[in-house]
Image: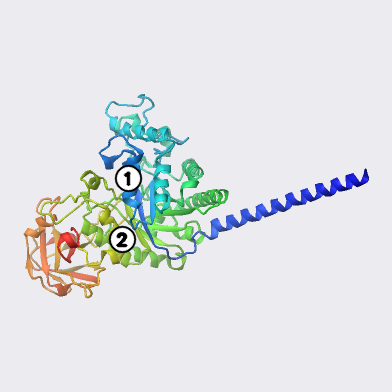
């Protein structure tokens, strides 16, 4: 009997020690995974090339690329394939919505859900189609995030959810139709910013000075991290949609609270990473200057010091800034920047929302990459027009300009090499301030009688290696100027009035505005800063736009303008 109990005790003791060993081993593995989730995910990796495509989600859910017909999985796969199959895109991001969701959530309705007609106004049938398509995906056992990221993964791409932190598309109460408002937003007007001075729909922005707002957003983000861990390599917080988080002047006071909020998101992402035995990167898209970010409550430098983010993208809202100050952003952060840095380019430009032309895309992306970006980020790079026109270019009058995007154009924009020798337009922003962000431009520039002024346009091309065939300077001015205009000290060869129409530079002219096209000698242009000097002898005028076009060859062989 004693031997039996001794043997049983020894067996129990061995089993107990085995359990302890397994528990300790498991704990060590969890610690290792946690360490990898924190330290091994790129937060100290200064450079990593990415070519990022951000899809806003609603265009796919609405099946806009196929003329808004009822969505099918084949349609959705085709849209993803256009961007990710045999293309240089490295990273595919799909937007999950903000307060309106493109996928099921316990925190709100799916985009377009009118609750069986109880919220319908009779004029929102198109809006309801988004919901119908979401329900179709649900019946197929999937949703927009799962379907698109699974397809992108199958095509070998890195995959992210991008979350619009404070989307303002549907918070205008003058719409007078309840289906356009989210329940949480409508029920909590005490959490609105109520500051209409910042920009479009800013009065209805959620105010992040309230703990309740930050908790609400954290819950949404946590839900998505939990639900889609299997499908993502990372999660992006898109602060540029939209860049309003508090009343004007409250940003610096809000910054510590936003940093604490970022810590909580980082902890959640790391916990999900440990649980799922994988890395989950956390990244942000923010404004192009540290000052603008801090004024809106975003202390990017502190986030970097604490290792809260794995890479940064700087961007603008809607209108591109053709000389977005990525070099200055990198310089200002100095040694605190220990992660990759990218810059995004949007689909429209100038104050009247002109679509960016092909050559302007090349000029802007060339500038970004030449200024030290680790890669490119395409925002709202829709291919709907390309798809709807059978893969053919949609040309403007004259046939030189194309303002619609294509997979071919997309494939060029990821590197300076692929844009080498391609037709380009280097330009400056008109200077419109949006949500407190000042673009990197001296325009509009008023030149008084008898005064000399100058502007500079940066050219990334090595024009000594591959020289352009023609150098054109387009100037939009408030009136016909009487002035001497020089490019790097060179006088123009000729003024060609017909080029303004041929190259579609006359859109939205107002009052007495004029567009000049001056053709300069090839030798006048150089790689780097190109100085345009104005000497007004007889009248005062304002330079509204400045665009330097380099024609390297025929548009059929060297790309549409």
Specify the label residue 78 is tagged with: 1
Residue 366 vertical position relative to residue 3 in the rendered view, above or below: below
Specify the label residue 175 is tagged with: none
SS at mark 1?
Answer: helix
SS at mark 2?
Answer: loop
Q: Position of residue 124 (x, y in %)?
A: 29, 30
Residue sitting at x 39%, y 65%: 330
Q: Distance of mark 2 from mark 1, alpha carbons?
A: 33 Å
Quadrant of the rendered structure where residue 158 is? bottom left
Q: Is residue 247 left or right of residue 558?
A: right
Residue 131 vertical position relative to residue 313 in the rendered view, above or below: above
Q: Is residue 428 left or right of residue 539?
A: right
The answer to whether residue 330 shows anywhere in this view is yes
Q: Is residue 199 left or right of residue 8?
A: left
Earlier-in-chain disc, 2 versus 1: 1
Residue sitting at x 23%, y 61%: 428
Depth check: 510 or 41 in front?
41
Specify the label residue 324 is tagged with: 2
Looking at the image, the residue that sits furthest to the right is 1
Q: Which of the two discs, 2 and 1, sits closer to the camera?
A: 1
Residue sitting at x 10%, y 56%: 502
Quadrant of the rendered structure where residue 320 is? bottom left
Residue 191 vertical position relative to residue 244 in the rendered view, above or below: above
Q: Position of residue 457 (x, y in %)?
A: 23, 66
Quarter of the image containing the N terminus?
Answer: top right
Quarter of the image containing the C terminus?
Answer: bottom left
Q: Position of residue 357 (x, y in %)?
A: 21, 55
Q: Position of residue 31 (x, y in %)?
A: 62, 55
**Crowdedness of circle 1 by 10 Å Cα count: few (<14), some, many (20+)?**
some
- Applied colour scheme: rainbow
């Amino acid at each position: 009997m004693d031997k039996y109990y001794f043997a049983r005790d020894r067996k129990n003791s061995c089993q107990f020690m085995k359990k302890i060993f397994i528990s300790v081993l498991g704990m060590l593995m969890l610690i290792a995974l946690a360490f990898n989730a924190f330290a091994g995910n790129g937060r100290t990796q200064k450079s990593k090339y990415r070519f990022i495509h951000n899809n806003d989600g609603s265009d796919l859910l609405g099946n806009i690329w196929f003329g808004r017909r009822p969505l099918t999985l084949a349609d959705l796969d085709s849209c993803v394939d256009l961007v990710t199959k045999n293309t240089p895109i490295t990273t595919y991001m799909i937007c999950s919505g903000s307060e309106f969701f493109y996928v099921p959530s316990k925190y709100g309705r799916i985009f377009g859900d009118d609750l069986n007609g109880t919220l319908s106004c009779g004029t929102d049938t198109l809006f309801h189609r988004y919901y119908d398509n979401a329900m179709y995906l649900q019946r197929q056992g999937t949703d927009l995030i799962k379907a698109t990221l699974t397809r992108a993964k199958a095509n070998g791409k890195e995959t992210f959810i991008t979350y619009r932190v404070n989307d303002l598309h549907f918070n205008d109460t003058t719409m007078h139709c309840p289906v356009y408002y989210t329940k949480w937003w409508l029920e909590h007007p005490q959490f609105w910013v109520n500051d209409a001075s910042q920009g479009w729909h800013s009065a209805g922005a959620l105010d992040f000075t309230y703990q309740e707002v930050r908790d609400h957003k954290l819950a949404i983000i946590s839900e998505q991290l939990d639900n889609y861990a299997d499908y993502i390599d990372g999660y992006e917080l898109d602060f540029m949609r939209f860049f309003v988080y508090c009343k004007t002047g409250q940003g610096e006071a809000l910054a510590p609270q936003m940093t604490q909020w970022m810590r909580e998101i980082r902890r959640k992402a790391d916990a999900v990473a440990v649980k799922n035995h994988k890395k989950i990167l956390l990244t942000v898209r923010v404004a192009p200057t540290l000052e603008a970010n801090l004024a809106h409550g975003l202390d990017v430098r502190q986030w970097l010091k604490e290792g809260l983010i794995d890479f940064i993208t700087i961007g603008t809202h809607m209108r591109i800034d053709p000389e977005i100050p990525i070099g200055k952003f990198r310089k200002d952060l100095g040694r605190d920047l220990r992660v990759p840095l990218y810059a995004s380019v949007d689909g429209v430009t100038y104050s009247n929302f002109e679509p960016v032309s092909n050559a302007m895309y090349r000029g802007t992306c060339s500038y970004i990459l030449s200024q030290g970006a680790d890669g490119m980020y395409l925002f709202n790079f829709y291919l709907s027009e390309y798809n709807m026109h059978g893969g053919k270019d949609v040309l403007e009058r004259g046939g030189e300009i194309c303002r619609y995007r294509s997979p071919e154009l997309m494939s060029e924009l990821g590197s300076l090499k692929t844009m080498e020798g391609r037709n380009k337009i280097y330009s400056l922003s008109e200077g419109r301030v949006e949500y407190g962000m000042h673009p990197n431009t001296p325009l509009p520039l008023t030149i008084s009688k008898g005064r000399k002024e100058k502007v500079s346009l940066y050219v990334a091309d090595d024009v000594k290696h591959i020289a352009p065939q023609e150098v054109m300077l387009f100037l939009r001015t408030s009136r016909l100027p009487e002035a001497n205009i020089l490019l790097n000290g060179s006088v123009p060869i000729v003024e060609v009035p017909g080029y303004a129409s041929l190259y579609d530079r006359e859109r939205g002219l107002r009052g007495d505005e004029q567009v000049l096209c001056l053709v300069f000698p090839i030798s006048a242009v150089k790689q780097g800063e190109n100085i345009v000097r104005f000497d007004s002898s007889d009248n005062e005028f304002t330079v509204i736009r400045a665009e330097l076009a380099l024609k390297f060859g025929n548009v059929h062989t060297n790309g549409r303008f």
